[in-house]
Image (cartoon, rainbow, N blue to C red):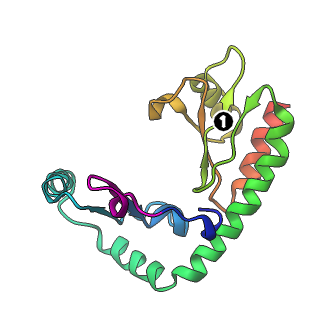
Amino acid sequence: EHDPAVRLPGAASEYERGISLGVISKPFGLGGVRVGWIACRDSELLQRMLQIKLFLSVCNGRADELLAGMALHHREELLRVQRRRIAANLALIRDNLDRLRPRIRWYQPKAGCIAYPSLAGQISAMEFAGRLLNETGVNIVPGSCFLQAPSHFRLGFGRADFPQAFQLLLDWLE
């Protein structure tokens, strides 16, 4: 959440079959660290999920575990830094995408560091992403990769270099 005062309770604590999950990578700005957790009151479902996890990977990487432990030890400071970064990047998006309406529409997320803007017009997000990557080196992921409408694309804004990449996107759109 961008504002800790509006934190939602975990689904696992609210519903009998609710599932809550968390990761280290996004909230702590540690892309690539593959450590997370899952909570569920349904022990049978939890066992089935564990079997799938063990099928996909037997164990976590030791370096990932060390980085995750360090991040959790310094969580308040890391989360504060990441929230500031996200707030600044969101302001940048808001100030610029709002003026690009109706060509690009977006709704500000209440949590996380990913938005899913949509394109108005004839070009699909897949074509848009391909052209943007080839012409600027900026990588966005089409919404169709996430089973979303073909006009949507994923815009991640949690990285420190987001302002530079976003400016390349804006310049390309002009």
Say if the magenta span includes residue 159: no
Toward which corner of the image does residue 163 lie, by quadrant? bottom right
Closer to us: 45 or 151: 45
- Residue flagged by tag 1: what amino acid is it? Pro
Give the residue pinned by disc 1.
117
80 relative position to 167: left or right = left
26 relative position to 108: left or right = left
14 relative position to 132: left or right = left
The quadrant of the picture occupied by the C terminus is top right
Closer to us: 132 or 58: 58
Q: Residue at x 87, y 37 (%)?
A: 99
Closer to us: 8 or 91: 8
60 relative position to 100: left or right = left
Region of the chain picked out in magenta, as a range:
9-20
Say if the magenta span includes residue 12: yes
**Is residue 97 placed above or below 3 in the rendered structure?**
above
How crowded pointer 1 is (Cα within 10 Å; few <14, some 14-19, many 20+) is rated as some
Q: Residue at x 80, y 26 (%)?
A: 102
**Is residue 56 placed above or below 126 in the rendered structure?**
below
Q: Position of residue 1 (x, y in %)?
A: 59, 62
Q: Position of residue 117 (x, y in %)?
A: 66, 36
Residue at the bottom extreme?
Answer: 73
The mark tally for this picture is 1
Q: Position of residue 44 (x, y in %)?
A: 12, 55
